[in-house]
Image (spheres, helix red, strand yellow):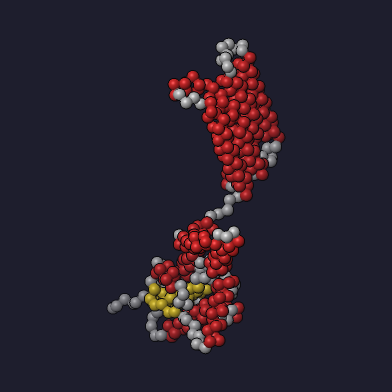
Amino acid sequence: MSKKKETEKTLILCVDRDNDIGVKGEIQSPIIGRKRNIEAASKLALKDPEEADANAVFGAVRTYDALSKEKGEGVYEVATITGSELGGVKADKNLVTQLKEVLSEFPAKNVVLITDGFADEEVIPIIQSYVPIMSIRRIVVRHSETIEESWALLSRYLRKLAEDPYYSRIALGVPGILLVIVAILWIFNYLLYAGYAFLMIIGSVLLIKGFGIDKRITSVSIPNPLELIKLFTMITAIVVLGVDAYQTFSSVAPHVPSDSSLWWSSLPRIAGLVTANAVDLIVVAFSILLIGRAIFYYFTHNRRIWRNGVGIIVLIWVREVALRASSILLAPVPPTSISDRLIIDLLFSAGLGIAGTLIAVLVTMSLSRRYKHYFGSEGEERTEKA
């Protein structure tokens, strides 16, 4: 006896890659089943009678009906999946997700693909990676060849170019930029360079679209606004340090001996000049950084805010100690005894700095215990996740 042949399941699949069904018809997808597809196509056709995707869905239902009437042991189902109005990776990702959902409900062995004929090259490889395509049917709406209907069809696509943000950015935005640049060059009598501007702009657009740079930029997640505070203060601190380095170099360079043999004897003086000129802006840069982090920790209820307060106080005393040390390095006669006035000032500043830091630590410990309900470990966990 021969074994009973396993029933073959075939899926009649309609694909709407630009999601007109969802955007215009406000219909959730995937749409599985004959009744739901007819309802979706009817609703979309009522919203926009000129929409080709409605005809594609009706075509899928018609194909389903025709195959279901044929004699055989096959089982058929009809479904519609949609992509995204943004196109690109987002549309393909939605198609894959919905295709998996349809196949989990109806595990088809092969697919009859129904499209409107405009997105076959993008859709076919996606479908074939999950289920074999047995047949492809393109539903193309027939139009009259009269001038009036040809103009109506043309005006429809022109309106799409003007109103659809996805197309208007290229069709209207780029020519608009070119015209504005030509006008500016004309005003300033630089119209001769319009050709260079055209090539640069068109080349930039082709480069951005060709490598998908715009999609990569839009896919980057926007950081937490509080994180921007830390980022801004960090950038500001780096800029201040850069200005400090330039200013210090400009001030010290004239005092550097050209004779390399005098470098060793001039090294203390050079070190003193660098310290005296650089310390103020270094303290300012790190204070900006600590203040920015303190603001971030305040709004995120993080107990590490107290460390930043101590850090600012330490910076103030570090500045004083650095200035006293530079005075010793720049002294005409180096101090030789601990009783020298310059040495005493250095030791006194260091002692006050240690005492001031100790007092700041004790005060912040007291404040930390007092405001533990506001700046607690829970806030610290939120900061880690932010």
Residue, x 52% and y 88% (percent of image)? 146
Q: Nearer the viewer, residue 115 or 133?
A: 115
The percent position of residue 237, horizontal first and vertical second, equals 59, 39
**Quick check: 219 above or below 19?**
above
Residue, x 55% and y 54% (percent of image)? 221
Q: In this rendering, does residue 181 appear at all?
A: no
The percent position of residue 193, horizontal first and vertical second, equals 52, 60
Q: Nearer the viewer, residue 382 or 187?
A: 187
Residue, x 62% and y 45% (percent of image)? 229
Q: Nearer the viewer, residue 2 or 54?
A: 54
**Quick check: 45 above or below 100?**
below
Q: Quadrant of residue 374?
A: top right
- Relative horizontal placement of residue 223, taking residue 116 as reference (left or right): right
Q: Residue furthest left?
A: 1
The percent position of residue 228, horizontal first and vertical second, equals 61, 47
Q: In this rendering, does residue 386 appear at all?
A: yes
- Relative horizontal placement of residue 313, taking residue 65 as reference (left or right): right
Residue, x 48% and y 62% (percent of image)? 199
Q: Residue furthest front?
A: 189
Q: Quadrant of residue 289?
A: top right
Q: Nearer the viewer, residue 223 or 96?
A: 223
Q: Quadrant of residue 368?
A: top right
